[in-house]
Amino acid sequence: MMTCTMRMVAMTLVASGLLVGSAWAEQIWICAVTSAVAVDEDGTVGPPDVGDKERPTFFRVDTAKKELTLLAPKSRRGEVTKLDTVVESDGQWLLSGVEHGRGLNVVITADGHMTLSVVADGVVWSVFGNVLSAEEAK
């Protein structure tokens, strides 16, 4: 009987921790891109090739909706990438998803830094910037 009670207490504590962790991770950030570089498999280094589109400069990350939404430039405003994973760990947030067959990973730190990587066959984009929580941006 004592073992069953201890299991129930342990399960309750784990469930509570998961709920608190989820609430803590439900954040919205405004991210500003400060630099971006692409490296191809042949060693070519240069700006990311986004085709005939303008390169994103600002985006919003919403962990509750699990979405990354472009805010600027105006021609790209409203484009959304769904995030599959949102994890808070050691004071930073790790987010990942898939966009048009490319892997997308974002790290947001408590001190306001953002690193984003886009990985496709034969190319890696590294994007760096700064973030403000939506509360700070008001």
Image (spheres, rainbow, N blue to C red):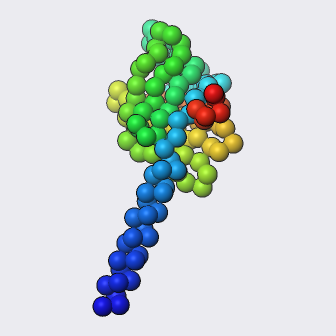
Decide if residue 99 is in sight here: yes
Furthest toward the bottom, the residue is: 1
Nearest to the observer: residue 35 or residue 87: 87
Nearest to the observer: residue 100 or residue 109: 109
- Residue drawn at x 44%, y 64% is 16
Q: Quadrant of the C terminus?
A: top right
- Residue drawn at x 61%, y 34% is 135
Decide if residue 120 is in sight here: no
Q: Quadrant of the N terminus?
A: bottom left
Nearest to the observer: residue 25 or residue 113: 25
Q: Position of residue 100 (x, y in %)?
A: 35, 26
Q: Is residue 96 above or below residue 137?
A: below
Residue 82 as seen in the image, left or right of residue 124: left
Q: Position of residue 11 (x, y in %)?
A: 37, 72
Q: Position of residue 9 (x, y in %)?
A: 40, 77
Q: Position of residue 133 (x, y in %)?
A: 60, 35
- Residue drawn at x 40%, y 64% is 15
Q: Quadrant of residue 137?
A: top right
Nearest to the observer: residue 25 or residue 102: 25
